[in-house]
Image: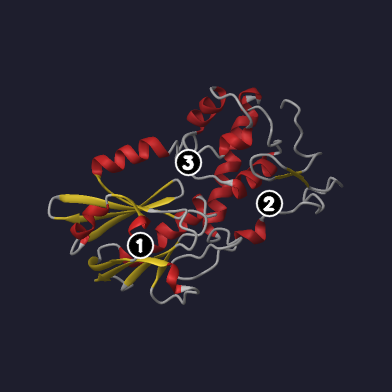
Amino acid sequence: MPELPEAEVVAQQLRASLTGATLTDYWVGRRDIVREGGHTVPWYRDAILQQIQRFGKSVALEFVKGEESRYIVAELGMTGLLLFRSVPIKHPQHVHVRLSFTGGKEPELRYWNPRRFGRLSLFDRKGLNRYIARRFGCDPLSVSQHDFVQLLRGRRGRLKPLLMHQQVIAGIGNIYANEILFRAGLHPNREASRIREATQVKLYDTMQMVLREAIASGGSSVRDFFAPDGSEGQYKRHHLAYGKEGHPCPNGCGRLLRRLQSERSSFFCPACQSKKIS
């Protein structure tokens, strides 16, 4: 499932290819693919794509026409992709939306989503603000170290579910939660509010490092992720813990990585990721 790094890669490619382009036409193949604001679809014709932003795991396209701005927010879901027309697509029947442009580097953007867990939502500015407020917590790339530490201190519960709680910290899913906690040396079930400040700071720094390195590598194409230009993310080559059950610990401690089955599978080293307070 695409997470923050993959969504940021999508946003970066859309910015480079479509910022300033004019939407000349659209096609919506399934009415249920638009979760909110379907009645406003005709407004977007002849609007200019002014800005592309990322919120958590979602990508928001800001269109401007006259003095008015409206937004198309794409949830990538488990298998959702935003793809340029030049990219060959398997099972084209799962392309549910096409946006045609003029004045950009790419003539078309397609929303491909076979399992349809993701949706498109169409908002005005007030609607977008309400959507952001109810769906997304702090962004792990822009939150300050101080605010992150305060967030941990004020939360009860286990570290891994907290990192993945989208209304608290937006954008981290199972892949990157595993990688962050392994590199920080923290057990997935550690109590968030009981780790010392130095360890909280280490977790913050590790979170930033992992996410930024993943973005620089194009994300992780573990199963179904491709960037809009069809490229695969290469960060999967740098995974140390995710999916590595039974592999020797990369830290050289002599133990094998184990799998902890909870809400989502956690991969950890029983020696390097202790439950002891640190």
Element marked by disc 3:
loop
Element marked by disc 2:
loop
Amino acid carrying label 3: it is Ala
Q: Which mark is residue 170?
A: 3
Tag 1 residue: 30
First-in-chain label (1 vs 2)? 1
Q: Nearer the viewer, residue 155 or 104?
A: 155
Tag 2 residue: 242
Task: Indicate the position of residue 51 as horizontal and vertical percent values.
Answer: 29, 55
Circle 1 Cα neighbour tier, 10 Å, few/some/many (<14 / 14–19 / ≥20): few
Q: Residue at x 44, y 67 (%)?
A: 94
Side of 278 where 5 appears, left or right:
left
Q: Cβ–Cβ below 8 Å for labels 1 and 3?
A: no
Please determine whether, in this image, residue 190 is positioned above or below residue 45.
Answer: above
Q: Quadrant of residue 98?
A: bottom left
Residue most toward the left? 66
Q: Nearer the viewer, residue 231 or 33?
A: 33
